[in-house]
Image (cartoon, rainbow, N blue to C red):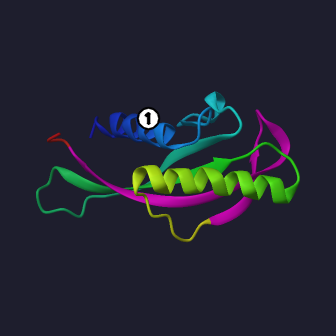
């Protein structure tokens, strides 16, 4: 399944294109600039009969600079709305959290996290 990383790169680019200008999605937190989005694989399910495709579940974090809670939630909401409007992604069970990223802040940063599902096939 050598193609999994390439699919994550493509999804990262698609999310970046959907987010407001200047907000980028990355797969490596060392490359994250705030505000930004971070993506990581959560589950790969080989539940297809063709033996070559799979269901992928990706965890996405929308992350804001540390500021007052109301402003942070408003900006996170703008990022989420842009992502949903520009990609058709329907995120449910969106969880607010304080995300600790050692390179950015010793304290938790305001974030929204959710999962999305994609289909991956070697026959692209």
Residue 65 vertical placement versus 43 (above, below): above
Element at label 1: helix
Outermost residue on the left side: it is 50
Position of the C terminus by quadrant: top left
**Label 1 packing within 10 angstroms: few (<14), some (14-19), many (20+):** some
> Residue 30, how many percent across, how many down?
65, 29
- Left or right: 19 with respect to 43? right
Q: Quadrant of residue 38?
A: top right
- Left or right: 33 with respect to 88? right
**Is 111 within the magenta?**
yes
**Is 115 within the magenta?**
yes
Q: Quadrant of residue 44?
A: bottom left
Q: Nearer the viewer, residue 46 or 121?
A: 121
Outermost residue on the top side: it is 31
Q: Nearer the viewer, residue 44 or 73?
A: 73
Residue 7 vertical placement versus 67 (above, below): above
Residue at 75 percent of width and 58 percent of height: 73
> Residue 29, how many percent across, how many down?
63, 35
Residue at 61 percent of width and 36 percent of height: 23
Residue matched to label 1: 13
Give the magenta-colored segment's residue range: 95-121
> Residue 40, how many percent across, how many down?
51, 46
- Left or right: 101 with respect to 8? right
Residue 48 vertical placement versus 40 (above, below): below
> Residue 2, how many percent across, how many down?
28, 35
């Amino acid at each position: 399944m050598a193609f999994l990383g390439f699919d994550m790169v493509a999804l990262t680019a698609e999310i970046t294109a959907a987010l407001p200008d200047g907000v980028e999605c990355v797969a490596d937190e060392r490359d994250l600039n705030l505000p930004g989005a971070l993506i990581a694989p959560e589950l790969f399910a080989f539940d297809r009969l063709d033996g070559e495709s799979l269901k992928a579940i990706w965890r996405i974090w929308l992350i804001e600079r540390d500021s007052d809670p109301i402003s942070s939630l408003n900006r996170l909401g703008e990022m989420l709305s842009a992502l949903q409007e520009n990609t058709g992604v329907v995120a449910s069970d969106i969880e607010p959290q304080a995300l600790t990223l050692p390179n950015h802040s010793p304290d938790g940063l305001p974030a929204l996290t959710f999962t999305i599902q994609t289909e991956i096939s070697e026959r692209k």
